[in-house]
Amino acid sequence: MDRYECYYRSLYAAAMAVNSSLDPKLVLKTIVECAAKAMEVKACSLRLLDRSGRQLLPGAGFGLSNKYLRKGPVDVTASAVDREVLSGRVVQVKDAATDPRFQYGKAAKDEGIASVLVVPLRVEDKPVGVMRVYTAETRTFDSVEEEFLTSIAAMSALAIENARLHQALKREYESVLSFDYRTFED
């Protein structure tokens, strides 16, 4: 199977995951796994901005150790890579262990990570997080790989927004059900 067919099949699987469940953890886990396998990389992760917009919190991961996933918060002010990505750019890190823009270089080296491709997750042109793929060997990603990962990230952002809207509707519905109309009776 050529890479375009592989990318198409992965996009299809991700779309089906988004369409079949409102459980964001399950959907995002499926999406990061599809992305990693399609791109033939070591791992993929998705991190979401906290309410303050200062930290990126774990959202989903595939192919990374628990130790690496729990290495600590990604502080946007300490991570030049993430600041660039959150501004809307796609960023490649050729050597995560030595690139000063990468916040956890030593942890990346210990995990066996060489290169990283990072793309933004955006909802209505507002940054909500980042998606990353990691390689075990040094790699330069081409424009097709960047476009594929950007497409998968857009689907992830859609899944996150769907889940958020579903939760809001559910809360609104539950508040209507709990409203006591007898307070308005004569």
Image (tube, rainbow, N blue to C red):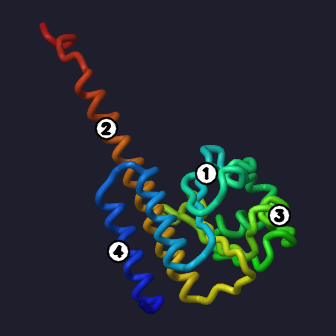
Q: Which residue is mark 1?
A: 58
Instruction: Please state if 11 lies on the left or on the right of 186 as rendered.
Output: right
- In the image, which disc is placed on residue 106? none
Residue sitting at 71 percent across and 75 percent down? 136
Q: Secondary structure at mark 2?
A: helix
182 or 56, nearer to the observer? 56
The amino acid on which the numbered mark 4 sits, given as a three-letter code, is Tyr
How much space separates mark 4 and mark 3, taking CA atoms? 34 Å
For the residue labelled by badge 1, is the local secondary structure a helix, a strand or a loop?
strand
Q: Where does the C terminus fall, quadrant-wise?
A: top left
Q: Earlier in the sequence, mark 1 or mark 4?
A: 4
Q: Which residue is mark 3?
A: 105
Mark 3 is on which residue type?
Gly
**Quarter of the picture holding the N terminus:** bottom left
> Which residue is identified by label 4?
12
Whole-number angstrom distance, CA of label 1 to CA of label 4: 24 Å
**Residue 45's x, y, as percent?**
59, 62
Residue 28 x, y percent position in the rendering:
47, 58
Check the image and report above or below for 181 versus 101. Answer: above
Task: Judge left or right: residue 159 versus residue 111.
Answer: left
Q: Identify the mark at residue 170; answer none if there is no mark.
A: 2
Q: Sequence order check: which comes first, mark 2 or mark 4?
A: 4
Q: Residues within 10 Å of mark 3 (few under 14, many from 20)?
A: some
